[in-house]
Image: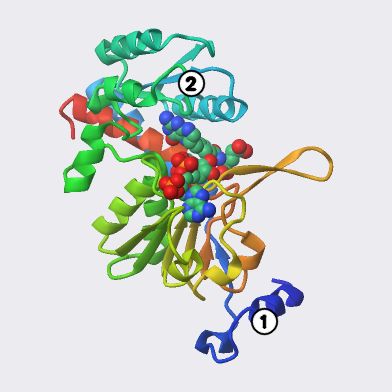
């Protein structure tokens, strides 16, 4: 870190702050590399399953409409599924597709033995009720882990298909910190996709968990108590450097496109990454942190779902 940045970080600390005596070197968590390793391990297992059981896991991804970010994610999901040796089925439907047609497609995929995982990319156009579509997916094929059966199973501590993004966060945390038991975790955001399941998983790892949201009083103060701070808000760089406890591990789930001077856009997280330097112990960058883990965990869930459907797990 350049000296100018380090001294700015030092100035943000109270002079009587014990940690202020130390210079903290903030290490980035390389989610891109971890995800690549995970995908390679998955590809090996897929090759083994094909040879030993004649099983090729299959993932169907459904995209309704032309949201540019969703198009990129779905394209990457399909490509990485095929790279891992699994069968990829892509369904691209027009933005004005009626809800009944999406439900009919889900029913068809539920009944297809070559499809072990079904993912309907969110957000969906306004005429389609996402909750209805999620409820229509066979829980055994719900590789997003969004169905109430999987959410409920996670909540009561049974085997479940777990939402990919929080699963990826926990994998990164365990890899870098080892046991999470007893650590204080603060999750900012309470969505069904990220915040709530992240909190459930951290609880399962024996963390003491606080879930913060838009009605939380003193959000900076809550964040400052965290050994593990998970930001899943969708607000560019909302979490400031001085909200972070020195030495804490910061998992930035946010993916925000903000305009650059040249008229193009760049990606930033929910955490002010530059301000976190010299304060956080570990931090996931955006891009290259949690995002790639989401797709790798989707492949992991597809493999798990296929094995369970064949009675192999
Ligand atoms: P979401 O459904 O919009 O939920 C956002 C949450 O943040 C809500 O619980 C909301 O609180 C809370 N919030 C909003 N403004 C706040 C504020 N000023 N102070 C405190 N809390 C606030 O979003 P999401 O689907 O969870 O996604 C969150 C972010 O993660 C987005 O940037 C999204 O693009 C990104 N994301 C990334 C990945 C990945 O793979 N990296 C995957 C999924 C999502 P209330 O509940 O009170 O409204
Ligand atoms: N819907 C998701 N909607 C949006 N980032 C993702 C995501 C990869 N049903 C359903 O895949 O799990 C889902 N299931 N989501 N998301 C967001 C959310 C969904 C977000 C980012 C990435 C998937 C990703 O690969 C890259 C990174 O952070 O390094 C950057 C990619 C880029 O845009 O340049």
The location of residue 134, given as percent across then percent down, is 32, 25
Give percent across and percent down for residue 60: 39, 19
Q: Is residue 151 above or below residue 190?
A: above
| Above or below: residue 256 compared with residue 229 | above
In front of the other: 83 or 206: 206
Q: Which residue occupies 24% across, 22% down?
A: 138
Extreme-bottom residue of the structure: 16
Q: Secondary structure at mark 1?
A: helix
Instruction: Determine which residue is flagged by label 2.
Output: 126
Residue drawn at 23 percent across, 44 percent down: 154
Q: Quadrant of the C terminus?
A: top left
| Residue denoted by label 1 | 11
| Classed neighbour count for the residue bearing mark 1: other residues with Cα under 10 Å, few (<14), some (14–19), many (≥20) | few
User: Neighbour class for label 2 at 10 Å: few (<14), some, many (≥20)?
Assistant: few
Residue 187 in the image: x percent, y percent?
41, 57
Q: Which mark's residue is nearer the viewer, 1 or 2?
A: 2
- Quadrant of residue 311 within the rendered picture: top left
User: In the image, 266: left or right of 157?
Assistant: right
Name the mark on residue 211.
Answer: none
Quarter residue 45 falls in: top left
Secondary structure of the residue carrying tag 2 is loop
């Amino acid at each position: 870190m350049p000296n100018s940045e380090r001294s700015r970080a030092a100035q943000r600390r109270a002079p009587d702050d014990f940690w202020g005596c130390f210079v903290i070197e903030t290490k980035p968590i390389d989610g891109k590399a971890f995800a690549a390793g995970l995908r390679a391990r998955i590809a090996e297992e897929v090759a083994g399953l094909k040879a030993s059981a004649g099983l090729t896991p299959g993932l169907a991804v459904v995209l309704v409409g032309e949201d540019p970010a969703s198009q990129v994610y779905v394209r990457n999901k399909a490509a990485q599924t095929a790279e891992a040796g699994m069968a990829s089925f892509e369904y691209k439907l027009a933005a004005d597709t009626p809800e009944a047609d999406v439900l009919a497609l889900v029913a068809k995929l539920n009944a297809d033995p070559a499809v072990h995982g079904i993912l309907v990319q969110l957000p969906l156009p306004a005429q389609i009720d996402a909750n209805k579509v999620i409820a229509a997916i066979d829980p055994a094929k719900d590789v997003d882990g969004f169905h109430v059966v999987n959410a409920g199973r996670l909540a009561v501590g049974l085997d479940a298909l777990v939402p990919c993004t929080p699963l990826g966060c926990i994998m990164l945390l365990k890899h870098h910190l080892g046991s999470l038991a007893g650590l204080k975790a603060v999750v900012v955001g309470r969505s069904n996709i990220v915040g709530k399941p992240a909190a459930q998983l951290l609880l399962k790892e024996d963390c003491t968990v606080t879930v913060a949201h838009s009605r939380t009083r003193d959000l900076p103060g809550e964040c400052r108590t965290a050994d593990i701070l998970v930001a899943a808000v969708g607000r560019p760089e909302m979490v400031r450097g001085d909200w972070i406890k020195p030495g804490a591990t910061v998992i930035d789930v946010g993916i925000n496109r903000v305009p650059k001077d040249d008229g193009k856009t760049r990606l930033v997280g929910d955490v002010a990454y530059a301000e976190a330097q010299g304060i956080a112990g570990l931090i996931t960058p955006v891009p290259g942190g949690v995002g790639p883990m989401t797709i790798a965990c989707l492949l992991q869930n597809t493999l798990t779902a296929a094995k369970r459907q064949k009675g192999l797990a």
